[in-house]
Amino acid sequence: MNIFKKTVPILLIIGSLFAVGCSAAEVEGQQQILDAREKFAQLRSGELDVVNDQTGETEQTFIFRYDEVGVLSYSLCGVSEDGEYFTFSNGYETYEIENGEYSYCRKGDPQFQMFTYDVRHPMTYEEFIFFDRSAAGKSSVSEENGETVCRVEYDPALIAGDGLPREVTEFSVTYRLKDGRLTAVTEQGKSGSQEYSYTIYVRRADNVEKVEMPPEIQAAATENP
């Protein structure tokens, strides 16, 4: 079971692949960005909505919550070229619909993956929010509508690791913060003549009381007891 879907836009996948780099010069707003990433990783619950800015479509929604012993429950729903996909885990059982096929596994099964506050789901730790100081170029900090807006332009050729397609010639990230916490992260890039723009909205921070099973999963589980 691939919990970090290959269908996630490539510009978003970058955030989970590379560690923070090092260079002599600091980026404007660097400490604010780093502090906000750390606070993001400290969330006990929340909702992440990934929106394609060009179409306005929400392509992925991730809702999560840690229980009192730190076990993660989550729901991951999205759309790709192959259609819709759904994953739900109560921490001890995982239900999934992908490519029209339903599957189920539980703790003890070889394919089961348990996530906790210590063993993180890729979308809950700070590296999911991309930042690479060694590849940073022009940067700026401004105030807009009561939020701090940090924008960093990156040189794709200098980004650490491998995974960024060579065709990507432009890449920038805009971090929006309120009271030191991330509210949205927009990743924009250009590959050949094609431009990309995706925004991760951080909603319901520490305000998810229960992760609900998606109705699609519920229906499939009922049909496949």
Image (cartoon, grey):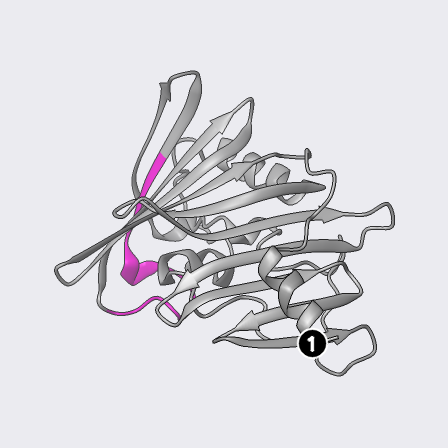
Residue furthest to the front in view is 223
Horizontally, residue 113 falls left or right of residue 59, namely right
Residue 53 in magenta stretch: no
Above/below status of 179 relative to 97? above
Residue furthest to the left in view is 193
Counting from the top left corner in percent of width and height, residue 151 is at 34, 36
Q: Which image quadrant is residue 96 in?
A: bottom right
Q: Residue at x 39, y 28 (%)?
A: 149
Image quadrant where one finds the C terminus = bottom right
Counting from the top left corner in percent of width and height, residue 120 is at 68, 58
Q: Secondary structure at mark 1?
A: loop
Query: Which residues fall within the magenta stretch?
Result: 151-166
Counting from the top left corner in percent of width and height, residue 43 is at 67, 40
Query: Which one is nearer the viewer's eye here, 37 or 11?
Result: 11
The amino acid beneath tag 1 is Asn
Q: Residue at x 67, y 73 (%)?
A: 223
Counting from the top left corner in percent of width and height, residue 5 is at 50, 67
Q: Residue at x 52, y 38 (%)?
A: 202
Query: Which one is nearer the viewer's eye here, 126 or 58?
Result: 58
How many numbered callouts?
A: 1
Above/below status of 156 relative to 48? below
Image quadrant where one finds the N terminus = bottom right
The crowd level at tag 1 (other Cα within 10 Å; few <14, some 14-19, many 20+) is: few
- The residue singled out by tag 1 in the image is 224
Q: Which image quadrant is residue 113 in?
A: bottom right
